[in-house]
Image: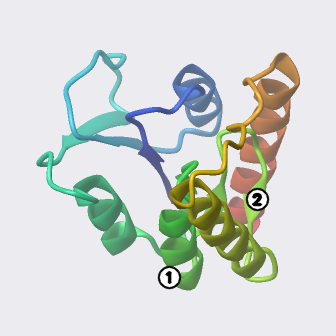
Amino acid sequence: MRILVDADACPVKDEIYKVAWRHEVPVTIVSNSHFRIPVHPLITRVVVSDGFDAADDWIAEQADARTVVITADILLADRCVKAGATVLSNAGKPFTTNSIGSAVAVRAIMADLRAGGDVIGGPAPFSKLDRSRFLSALDAALVRLKRG
C-alpha cells in the first residue's frame, strides 16, 4: 500500500504526511521541480522532467489497486481510477468509477467555455473545511485498503 501525490500544486502535503505516518504507509511526492519534503523513511520524492504531463504519466503508470492517488487533475484522476487506484482530490472528494465520467465532461465543457472567451470563475478558495474533509477521506481510504 502506498500514497502517490501529484505534488506541484498540492495544498495538503503536510496533512498527507501526518496521516501516512500514523498508518505507516509510504508516500511518494511526484513533481516537476525540487522542493522541501520532510526527512522521513516513509517519504520519497520523484522529480520528473518538465515535459508536458510527465508527472501525470509517472503517477498513472505506478497506480494500482493498492495505491491512493492525491490529485486535483481530473484527467490524471480518470487514468488512475481506470487503473484501480483509490483517488482523492485535494479537498477530499473521491473520484470513483461512478463519478469520474461526469467530472471529465464538466472539465471539457469548462475548457470549451474558456476557449470561447467566456469569463468563468475558478475553483473556490481552499478552506479549513476542505482540509478537514481531506484528512477524514484519506484516513478512511487507508483504513479500507488495509482491510482489503
Percent x, y of residue 122? 68, 38
User: Residue beneath label 2, please?
Assistant: 94
65 horizontally vs 26: left or right: right
In the rendered image, is residue 65 in sight?
no
Say what secondary structure mark 1 lies in. Answer: loop
Query: Which residue is more in the foreground, 91 or 64?
Result: 91
At horizontal 45% and vertical 45% (from top left) the residue drawn is 5
Label 1 is placed on what type of residue?
Ala
Q: Quadrant of the C terminus?
A: bottom right
Label 2 is placed on what type of residue?
Pro
Say what secondary structure mark 2 lies in. Answer: strand
Image mark for residue 83: 1
59 horizontally vs 93: left or right: left
Image mark for residue 9: none
At horizontal 34% and vertical 20% (from top left) the residue drawn is 37
At horizontal 16% and vertical 48% (from top left) the residue drawn is 48
Percent x, y of residue 65? 56, 76
